[in-house]
Amino acid sequence: MKRNTAAKVAVASAGAMLLAACGQGGPGADSGAISDDSIVLAVLNDQSGVYKDLSGPNSVKAVEMAIADFKEEHGDDAVTDNIEVVSADHQNEPDVANTKAQELYDRENADVILDVPTSSAALAVANQAKTKKKLFLNVGAATTELTGAQCNKYTFHWAYDTYMLANGTGTAVTEGGGKNWQIIYPDYAFGQDMEKSFTAAVEGAGGSVDGSIATPFPNDNFATFLTKAAAKDPDVIGTMQAGGDLINLVKQFNEGGYADRGISLAVGLMFITDIHSLGVEQFAGTQFTEAWYWNMDDEARAWADRFLEETGTRPSFAHAANYSAALQYLEAVQRAETDESDAVVEELEGLQAEDVFLRNGEVRAEDHRVIHDAYLAKVKSPDEVEEDWDYEEIVATIPAADAFRPVEESGCEM
Amino acid sequence: MNEVLQYTIQGLAAGSFYALSALGLAIIFGVLGVVNFAHGACYMLGAVVAAVLLDTVGLGFWPALLVVPLIMFAFGVLIERTLVRWLLALDPLYNFLLTFGLTLLLVDLVKRRYGVSGLPYERPDVLRGQIELGALRLPTYQVFVFVFSLLVCVLVWMLMTRTRIGMIVRASTERSDLAQALGINVGRWVTPVFGFGIALAGLAGVLAAPFRAITADMGSNFIIILFAVVVIGGLGSILGAVVAGFLVGLVEAFGQAYAPTFAQILIFVLMAVVVLVRPAGLFGREETAR
Amino acid sequence: MPEAPMLEIRGLDAFYGEAQALRGVDLTVAEGEVVTLVGRNGAGKTTLLRSVMGLHRQVTGELLFEGRDIVRTPAHKRARAGLGWVQDDRGVYASLTVEENLLLPPVVSDRAWALDKVYEAFPVLADRRRAGGTTLSGGEQQMLAIARVLRTGARMLLLDEPTEGLAPVIVRQIGDIIRQVKESGGTVLLIEQNVKFAATVADRHYLLAQGSVVESLDNAEFSARQAELLQHLGM
């Protein structure tokens, strides 16, 4: 009920702001190279709900770290000294995201919006970016639509997507011998998208998906769904659940003793925060696709140590990707010597970059998919864990060129 | 056949959480006339406290089954003494709103302190694995949850039917003012009964901890189903709460198995049918449904 | 020889919100007396009885039980002080067995009837001791409700229309019980619409109308004016 009211207010205020914006004469009216003499980076994400831990306030910290590094690197040569971060909570609701994005672009003078988990919310913000001709570097959302049919000139997709997850995990697990799959997925856009992507990846690798079960969302009881899937004697049960639902499902999978019957569990999307909250033991041996892992090499680790000092916790890949997106954006502004959107887009398109997060990174000009090395990870067993948050082992690196959807399949026309 | 038995035990295990919590809800409603909206949050707190005690002082699952309900009892007493008590004389809506607000507060406090991703919890080794009966394999933990919960329900039922305390609680539940006129100090029982009801929700939370995601939001959906359980069983009916709890668990499990899209709706269809046919619920008396 | 009254009410007003239900009621009941409250529906009889028991709290005035002002005393303490309550709908608990119904209220004086004595006096209750309270017939439930307060040893019984809707044979039995209580020194204040019945059990009668006591009659006067009273009561 509260949400409905919020939605109505959102629609009303959105309308009002649209009118206000029309009267202002549009962007680009400023004379200086840097609009309003300052660069404003806006982090729009879930500050209170299910994705708070894996992005949330710590994504803001990551962006602040990027700004600090940028300033330190360029010193007096920096295009401006005046760089600030603002943040807003979109509550994972597309209508809230839409309103907040307008506010950030218009009222807070944001030059770029970062993060935005939840696919429907991200697509709403992408649409605003297109309308306002301001940048949107998405980190937190999974949908391939951002770089597919709904792509646009001002939207970039930085960290991961459903194709990458399915391609990595689906292919690797199938090639490792898990030929017959049952998929359990939450019945909303993300889950349906994941189910399709995984089916394609599994079949592409020579396996088959014999059945898919759509489940309510959110849901805390998966025991029956698991029994039903296991009754078909699959090699693999693939779960596309996320967050709390995933943890419920994994607990109940372990409870059901399916592993003893030779059924393995493949997880579509998992964040290190999920492993932390469930405990390594319950996840031990599970393979999944990672965009980045804090302890994967010295460079990542050094940055993760700084992050730990700032926040008291280890970063998820989303935190590192927000850092990377903010840093690359600022570098692009530095090179363009202006924060004018079209000039920055031009700098970013085709950019090849290396940073804490991006390995063999490239910003594809055609669809704005940021490609980079991805990783097949495995959850450690409890006796392999050497320190807090030391949960993952990188099994294989999936080269950037193979990790993401080929550009010709994207269907993106800008 | 094997699957049907699996669904049955899964339904009964899920139903155990409902039955225990609904029992607490029913007792509180009976004696205080308070619809405790915070019951879902208390279920969540039971699980969170169990996880935190395991993490901080290494309190295992078995002692937690006793210690956590005691802590929750104390918490219930605190809430009753400091908040609920002052609104008892007013329209019951005030306490409904109070406990609703309390829910939001508790959920946000847990989020603030422990984040949103949840807390880890391991069940004891003896409860792992499967019980094998010929071709039949039943998860040990689910069987345990069902048997243990049933035992607790039977104990509570005996407490209610075989003891003087139970007699007083039943009388206060049925007609509080009459019990007063017969010399029963109903007010004296209000605080312990509230604490006891909260403790039952906390116990359900401990039982859920190894089996469910322990997050601040775990009670949010739960409380909605719990209200359906209490309505189906009959508001204030102790036997009704237990029977309806297990029944709803079974409906949920078989619904998920044979009509997954309608699994949750089925529960509310059942509730609507019960309300139409027997407005006071399966075990409710007309006078308690006023 | 005037004894100190067991119950003395002086200037009692009772309200339901803004509406006044009792206006300056004065009433006394001596120990060992049986007194009835007579009046039309809505005259305030039940409000008066509930005010004495403490079930109706919105009252002002004096309410002395055995010389102690109990107007602010909660109902359960009044019960423990010796007031025995029989509700107009009998107030038998459905969720308690017959025996549990009997055992529920605490014993308050040494005049309490032992369970055996109760069963001897009410054999039907002994036969149905394990049955649910409301499985009894209306008359049996009334027996149970009265037996329940006798078992506590209450010194003064408050009965709200104990004969209402019951068969003549049961009404006679209830009359016997009330007389038996009186013989053993008990005190009774009862509401009674059945004027004939009232005349057979009571010593005195208060006639209530519109929330006030309009007349106080002893039983001789009451019996003599039966026809007039019946008309007044609209019967």
Image (spheres, coloured by chain):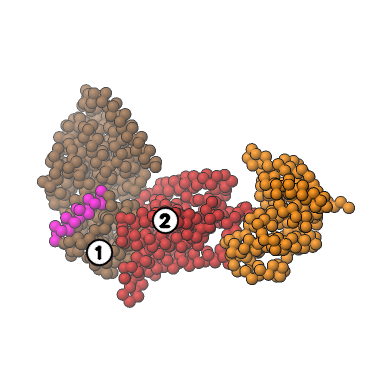
Chain colours: A brown, B red, C orange
Q: Nearer the viewer, residue B62 or B158?
A: B158
Task: State the residue position of label 2.
Answer: B273
Query: Which SS class for mark 1?
Result: strand
Image position of C106 with respect to B223: above or below: below
- Per the rendered image, the range of residues in magenta is A189-206
* Quarter residue B4 falls in: bottom left
Per the image, is A12 magenta? no
Query: Which SS class for mark 2?
Result: helix
- Residue A76 numbered tag: none
| Residue A207 visible from this viewpoint | yes
By secondary structure, the bulk of the magenta-drawn segment is best described as helix
Q: Inspect the image, locate mark 1, and give the three-letter code of the amino acid beneath it.
A: Ser
Q: Nearer the viewer, residue C56 or A68?
A: C56
* Quarter residue A133 falls in: top left
Residue in the picture at 31% in, 32% down: A14
Q: Nearer the viewer, residue C195 or A72?
A: C195
Task: State the residue position of label 1.
Answer: A264
Per the image, is A198 magenta? yes
